[in-house]
Amino acid sequence: MIFDDYFFVVPVYRLQEEKYYSEMNSDFEKQISEAWDDSFRQNNPDLVRGWQQHHRSSYGGDWEFNEIIGYIKLYFMGTQVRGEYWSTIPRSKIRTRRKLFEYKTHKLYVECEVRETTNEGVLSAVHEYLIGCKKQLRNRYVDLREFDALKIHLDWKSLFETKNQFPHASA
């Protein structure tokens, strides 16, 4: 079911930021140590810096945005929280700059019921759903930074009620 009544979109990364940069730096060190000895590197810092910038670009660039492999699009279905999942093609996730996203499923994790229509109740169900998604995507990094920054500021009850309004048939 593809529709456009989402209330939050959460990016999914191939791996965590620290691991990405660690792998990038290790790859750079491996390449440079095979080509240049320590003495050459110390005597040519500008050359090393230039090669490092080129390597960063060819490796895949910065982690943020370039390593996204999917999105969880959260929505309410009646009293349930669900999330469509969109992921990149191909199935094997590698470093790449060219991405094509495809619809995968109408719910990544089993739906979570909103038990209380209070701010706390709705937020609890959304949070429970996102934790379930993280478990489903255990080898990926579900980026909840924006969600965590905004969750205490949102009127979850109002959002829930607004997203669950259906047009009534006129008599």
Image (cartoon, grey):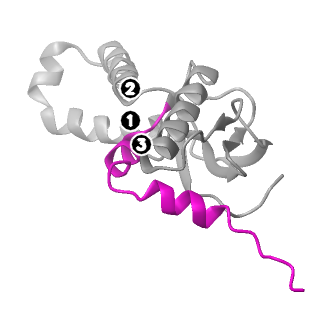
Q: Is residue 51 above or below residue 30?
A: below
Name the residue beneath numbered marker 1: 55
Q: Is residue 67 found left or right of 45 in the rendered image?
A: right
Amino acid at circle 1: His
Magenta segment range?
142-171
When asked about the image quadrant of residue 81, the answer is top right
Name the residue beneath numbered marker 2: 24
Q: Distance between the Cα atoms at labels 1 and 2?
A: 8 Å
Q: Residue at x 59, y 67 (%)?
A: 162
Residue 149 picture location, percent across and down: 32, 47
Q: Distance between the Cα atoms at labels 3 and 1?
A: 9 Å
Give whichever of discs 3 and 2 has the lower sequence position: 2
Instruction: Between residue 8 and residue 25, name the one nearer to us.
Output: 8
Residue 62 picture location, percent across and down: 38, 42
When asked about the image quadrant of residue 26, the answer is top left
Residue 167 picture location, percent across and down: 77, 75
Work out whether residue 11 can be spotted: yes
Instruction: Say few, some or many: other residues with alpha carbon within 10 Å of mark 1 (under 14 / 14 to 19 / 20 or more).
Output: some
Q: Residue at x 29, y 35 (%)?
A: 52
Work out whether residue 66 can be spotted: no
Q: Residue furthest left?
A: 43
Instruction: Between residue 120 and residue 71, name the one nearer to us.
Output: 120
Name the residue beneath numbered marker 3: 61
Q: Is residue 125 above or below residue 153?
A: above
Q: Residue furthest right?
A: 171
Q: Residue furthest bottom?
A: 171
Instruction: Say few, some or many: other residues with alpha carbon within 10 Å of mark 2 (under 14 / 14 to 19 / 20 or more).
Output: some
Q: Distance between the Cα atoms at labels 3 and 2?
A: 10 Å
When asked about the image quadrant of residue 94, the answer is top right
Secondary element at tag 3: loop
> Do the residues bearing badges 1 and 2 touch, measured as CB atoms within 8 Å?
yes
Secondary element at tag 1: helix
